[in-house]
Amino acid sequence: MFSSVWVALGLSLTCTSALSLISPAWFQTPTFSFGILTYCSWPQGNSWNQSCATFSSLEDIPDFAWKVSAVMLLGGWLLLAFNAIFLLSWAVAPKGLCPRRNSVPMPGVQAVAATAMIMGLLVFPIGLASSFVKEVCEASSMYHGGKCRLGWGYMTAILNAVLASLLPIISWPHRTKVQGRTIIFSRATERIILVPEMNK
């Protein structure tokens, strides 16, 4: 059961991360919004009539810090997607093929994905000092949005990165020593395993 919950969490985290990456709602004004890969504009008071565009390559992204952030976020998302697909195949595989069902495989990949995503989110606001953003947000600078307000896309990306960083921590079994025995509590199987300590 734990593996099914873990797979569901991994897949949903991958999907919401993809949604936040393609969202143009990272920073917004009343007539313009932009994200890491897309931007939209619309007439004043008519947000239903949007005209959106995508940065089709790294050369189109207006600032170097923004480019670095895009590479880190996309790399983190690819690792997260790879891990989710691997978890799905691990969960549906017959028990004979996966003998170690009591622990989640590859928590390190998810930890690296979370680290890349967090670093990308920290680097992105440096790009607020670019001429593209200054034209839209007017008084913007590094880590200051000027007249732009924070949008739901950036907040979702932050939440996804935090959740992605917590999942590997939960998956590792916890060990403690009591009177010459090692006690391993595995959340994956919800049981305590006593291992006798070997003296040399």
Image (cartoon, rainbow, N blue to C red):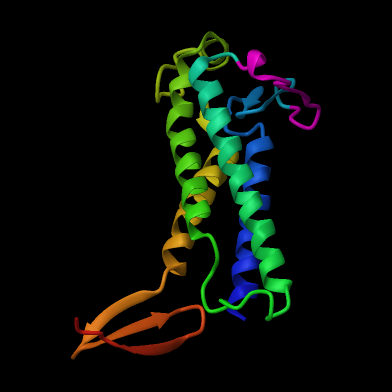
> Would you say residue 147 is visible in this rendering?
no
Q: Looking at the figure, which quarter contains the C terminus?
A: bottom left
Q: Which residues are magenta?
A: 46-61
Q: Is residue 107 left or right of residue 173?
A: right
49 falls in the magenta region: yes
Q: Residue at x 58, y 41 (%)?
A: 152
Specify whether 153 is left or right of 191.
right
- Residue 3, given in percent of the width and then of the height, sits at 61, 74
Q: Is residue 37 left or right of residue 160?
A: right
Q: Residue 46, relative to residue 92: is it above or below? A: above
Q: Nearer the viewer, residue 134 or 4?
A: 4
Pick whichever, 3 or 164, lies toward us: 3
Where is residue 124 shown, x and y percent of the image?
A: 48, 28
> Could you say where residue 163 lies in the image, as x and y percent from the top left?
49, 56
Spot occupied by residue 177 in the image (x, y as percentages of width and height): 23, 82
Against 120, residue 180 (above or below) is below
